[in-house]
Image (cartoon, rainbow, N blue to C red):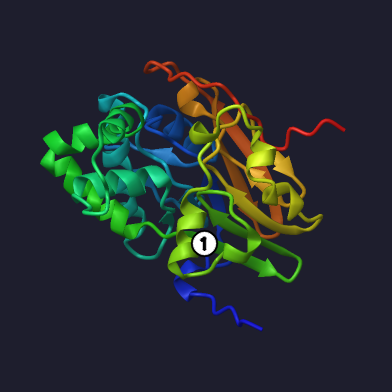
């Protein structure tokens, strides 16, 4: 039997409340509103203030904080995350980043990854899905900030309160056998699952059946984003937090306090043009 050795860097310290935020995609106004709704204060310089009341609060972004938004909002988002990542983590870690497939892809483009084949279709995809690339290619300072954040992103985190309550956090839903593993294949499965756009017309529950098949009635949660949904999708111990902020819906978070889990959301604030989306619902069972 394989022994799983947990990397201590991936274990979230107990004694903190965790605000776990779904896919931001440049919705910076909504991110600020959601954090303030959790009792955090953001000062005039855009810094999240550490006060005696918020000392115990930590933030985890589930990946895909870039792309799809307009350039002004993407710039604001990268700068806000970069500044606060350094600010909040000065004395001890309070701000955690998970790598999404959008961070991964943008990184591959701007670092001229030799394994990335540049075809006409690929260039079309770059413009359509990865609009942060063009922004970073013309703004070297912003590119450096992004690269720094990219290196700080983990593939997964785990909060293990006791033998009855835990939460494993990844960007994408993946089969249980890959969860919290550190090999290359597992990493890629936690960053991106099979493409919906390449399997149009197929129900999400048929495309990734393992998610509901492996779901269990316990409090060992797997919390992920990646699959834009019209609302939080929760089935047994599987939870999708990507509630389509950039598509005009909401930005959502899960809040872990000791061994309890709750949720909160804020609405799209119409500070930029929303993207369009046809929903393919997860856990869309017809009993």
Q: Is residue 72 visible?
A: yes
The quarter of the rendered structure image containing the C terminus is top right
Q: Which residue is mark 1?
A: 157
Image quadrant assignment for residue 134: top left
Q: Nearer the viewer, residue 78 or 127?
A: 127
The quarter of the rendered structure image containing the N terminus is bottom right
56 left or right, relative to 100: right
Residue 147: percent from the left, percent from the top?
Answer: 23, 51
Mark 1 is surrounded, within 10 Å at the Cα level, by few (under 14), some (14 to 19) or many (20 or more) other residues, namely many
98 left or right, relative to 200: left
- Please give the name of the residue rendered at 83% of the width and 30% of the height, measured from the top-left corner: 286
Q: Nearer the viewer, residue 50 or 118?
A: 118
* Figure check: 128 above or below 36: above
Residue 270: percent from the left, percent from the top?
Answer: 43, 16
* Figure check: 189 above or below 146: below
Q: As drawn, which residue projects farthest toward the right?
A: 287
162 left or right, relative to 75: right
Q: Nearer the viewer, residue 47 or 181?
A: 181
Image mark count: 1
Residue 129: percent from the left, percent from the top?
Answer: 36, 31
- Please give the name of the residue rendered at 39% of the width and 65% of the height, measured from the top-left corner: 92
- Please give the name of the residue rendered at 77% of the width and 49% of the height, measured from the top-left corner: 236
**SS class, disc 1:** strand
- Please give the name of the residue rendered at 44% of the width and 53% of the height, measured from the top-left corner: 98
Image quadrant assignment for residue 133: top left
Residue 283: percent from the left, percent from the top?
Answer: 72, 37
Q: Nearer the viewer, residue 262 or 144?
A: 144
Q: Is residue 15 visible?
A: no
């Amino acid at each position: 039997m394989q022994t799983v050795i947990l990397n201590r860097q991936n274990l979230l310290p107990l004694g903190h409340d965790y605000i776990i935020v779904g896919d931001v995609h440049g919705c910076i106004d909504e991110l600020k509103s959601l954090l303030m709704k959790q009792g955090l204060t953001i000062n005039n310089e855009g810094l999240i203030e550490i006060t005696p009341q918020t000392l115990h609060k930590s933030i985890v972004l589930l990946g895909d904080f870039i792309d799809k938004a307009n350039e002004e909002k993407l710039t604001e988002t990268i700068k806000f995350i970069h500044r606060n990542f350094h600010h909040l983590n000065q004395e001890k870690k309070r701000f955690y980043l998970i790598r999404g497939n959008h961070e991964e892809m943008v990184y591959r483009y701007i670092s001229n990854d030799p394994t990335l084949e540049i075809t006409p279709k690929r260039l079309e995809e770059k413009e359509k899905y990865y609009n942060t690339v063009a922004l970073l290619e013309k703004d070297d300072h912003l590119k450096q900030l992004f690269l720094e954040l990219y290196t700080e992103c983990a593939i997964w985190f785990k909060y293990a309160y006791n033998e009855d309550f835990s939460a494993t956090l990844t960007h994408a839903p993946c089969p249980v056998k890959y969860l919290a593993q550190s090999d290359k294949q597992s990493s890629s499965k936690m960053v991106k699952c099979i493409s919906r756009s390449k399997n149009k017309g197929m129900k999400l529950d048929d495309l990734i059946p393992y998610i509901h098949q492996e779901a269990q009635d316990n409090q060992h949660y797997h919390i992920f984003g990646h699959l834009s949904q019209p609302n939080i999708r929760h089935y047994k111990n599987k939870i999708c937090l990507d509630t389509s902020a950039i598509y005009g819906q909401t930005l959502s978070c899960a809040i872990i306090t000791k061994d309890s889990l709750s949720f909160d959301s804020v609405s799209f604030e119409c500070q930029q043009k929303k993207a369009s989306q046809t929903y393919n619902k997860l856990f869309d069972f017809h009993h």
